[in-house]
Amino acid sequence: MISVAIIHCPRSVDRRENLRLLLDQLPDASVIEDSGNGDAVGKRLHRRGCWPIARRAWSAFDPSARWHLVLEDDALLCSGFAETLRGVLDGSASACVSLFHGARDCSVATVMPTPIIPGWISWADSDRYGARHLPHHDYLITQGMRDLGVRLRHVRRGWGRRAWGPCSGSH
């Protein structure tokens, strides 16, 4: 089983329709909203970075699930996404998997095995590298997985700017 959390910034009006599309494909997903206090990066770098909202999204994992997927509200999912993701995860054992490398050279979706999430959150809370204040939590994932000895697998599959899965360019 895979639990899902979507990071949503309600102030980004252009992402609201895409959030509806994501929820159509992932109806059991939890939506983690930016509190409006600088949790999310949005179109500009906020002083607090992205860790507060990312932390809430990672903390929303279902402990009975084997995997937890966190994605941003601008991710484009292709038809068959859930089935394709299961296939990728079957070959990933205990690795953390980064999906959707896009135009800003970062991931808009990452899947982690649920048993490593509490340790990773504790590691990130320690702010050992000052990365919590960076614009994307990818940096925390990359460094944290390295420090925790967890393999990080990057899956670069897609057509178009940020779509992932077996598709012809539409969601």
Image: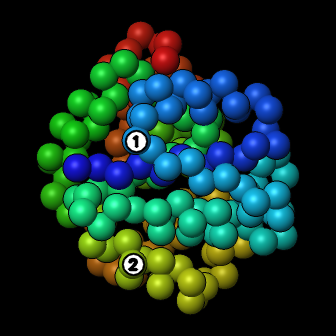
Q: Residue 98 appears at what percent x and percent y? A: 40, 50
Local crowd size for mark 1, using a 10 Å CA cut-off: few (<14), some (14–19), many (≥20): few
Residue 96 visible (yes or no): no
Residue at point 28%, 37% (across, down): 85
75 relative position to 67: left or right? right
Q: Which residue is mark 1?
A: 28
Find numbered disc 1 in the image and state the secondary structure of the residue it sits on: loop
Q: Relative to the observer, which residue lies in front, 66 or 90?
A: 66
Local crowd size for mark 2, using a 10 Å CA cut-off: few (<14), some (14–19), many (≥20): few
Residue 46 visible (yes or no): yes
Gap in angstroms between the C-alphas marked 2 and 1: 22 Å
109 relative position to 105: left or right? left
Res 152 quadrant in image = bottom left
128 relative position to 142: left or right? right
Q: Which residue is mark 2?
A: 118
Mark 2 or 1: the one toward you: 1
- The amino acid beneath tag 1 is Asp
Res 52 quadrant in image = bottom right
Q: Relative to the observer, which residue lies in front, 31 or 83?
A: 31
Residue at point 66%, 24% (across, down): 17
Contact flag, marks 2 and 1 (Cβ < 8 Å):
no
Res 157 quadrant in image = top left
Q: Residue 147 appears at what percent x and percent y? A: 39, 81
Checking the image for residue 150, the label placed there is none
- The amino acid beneath tag 2 is Pro
